[in-house]
Amino acid sequence: MVRREEGGPAGTLAGRHRNLLWPAEPAAQRPGMAAPRGARTPLTRVAIFGGTHGNELSGVLLARHWQEDGAEVQRPGLRVTPFISNPRAVHRGVRYVDRDLNRVFDPAHLGPEPPEDQPYEVEQAREIHRLFGAYDVILDLHNTTSNMGCTLILESSRDDVLIQMFRYIQSSVAPTPCSVYLIEHPSLKYATARSIAKHPVGIEVGPQPQGVLRADILQQMRSVVKHALDFIQYFNEGREFPACSLEAYQVTGKVDYPRKANGEIAAVIHPSLQDRDWQPLKPGEPAFLTLDGTTIPFDGDGPVYPVFVNEAAYYEKGEAFAKTRKVTLTARRLDAAGAPREAPPQTRFPGDV
């Protein structure tokens, strides 16, 4: 369940850049939403994807390491499979070869009839779907060039298991911030590699340049994976997780750069917005700066909370930043059906009563 706290969809920057909008009705009221997916059976098959984008090296390094020595990620009763998602892109040191692998996991590409002359990433997506489509959890490891810190990406506001997991991870890594990005949206469809699992988890850590490794970013990612696997183990063992709430940032639209008539970028992210992911952006505040020194303000309802600000990989996608609104997600009490119930230990978080 999701409750809106503040912020909302914004308008355009006076028509000078493209702005995709979303009406701000609560997720629970939108038609066609999937039923709640809170698991009541143990989660036994887990995959860890690295290299979905070949130049995001933290996940590549960790997945390769765990393929060689998986002791760190194994847990009793779990089958944990580290996997390099896009080996050709990793070998070439690029995001992708033909198509963005993290955008082709949809019925058009995964249907029973393979597309003619299918790009490499579509062929790879079909193989990944065959191998991992029945998995319970996929942890998909990514880096961003934006100043987003540690981010957990959630695809459904109704996934009680992941809301509980994310709350557990936040509590475990504190005081290091770990924000939650909810990409549930009626028209912005991501078709991510992890979406084939029952419970898809995106782990995005930055800032880190493409093709570069940073020890601090690597360690944050490694820590999040550890706590995610610990949560799954505790859940399977019957530990009770009381009902909880979780603050998240739900995507409402994407904002392009101002552009010339020929499509070239006409302005850059304003210095006062740069590196301020997750911080409120209000109408009238600077958003872009032209080469002649003109400030283009943000024009629309607000505040919004920008994320993926000036992400290098999104220049080709026409995205200067994504807009989000703050929401509060709630999850029901969780325990594993059939697990021992004699005085199971409870997991308590700061602020629980």
Image (cartoon, rainbow, N blue to C red):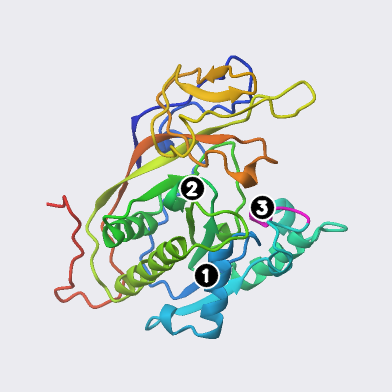
Establish if 91 lies above or below 38. Answer: below
Tag 1 or tag 3, which sits nearer the N-term? Answer: 1
Q: Where residue 1 sits in the image (x, y, percent)?
A: 35, 43
Rendered position, 67 above or below 39: below
Query: Which residue is drawn at the image coordinates 57% and 53% (left, top)?
Result: 209
Question: Residue flagged by tag 1: what amino acid is it?
Answer: Ile
Give the image location of residue 291, x and y in percent: 65, 23
Q: CA distance from mark 3 to mark 1?
A: 20 Å
> Magenta part of the protein: which range?
98-103
Q: How many marks?
A: 3
On the question of residue 271 being in view, the answer is yes
Query: Camera-side residue: 16 or 331?
Result: 16
Residue denoted by label 2: 34
Q: Which mark is residue 123?
A: none
CA distance for labels 2 and 1: 25 Å
Q: Position of residue 72 (x, y in %)?
A: 42, 80
At x 31%, y 55%, the residue is 176
Task: Tell me the kind of residue under disc 3.
Answer: Asp
> Looking at the image, which residue is at 47% across and 55% down?
205
Q: Report the disc number at residue 106.
A: 3
The residue that label 1 is drawn on is: 48
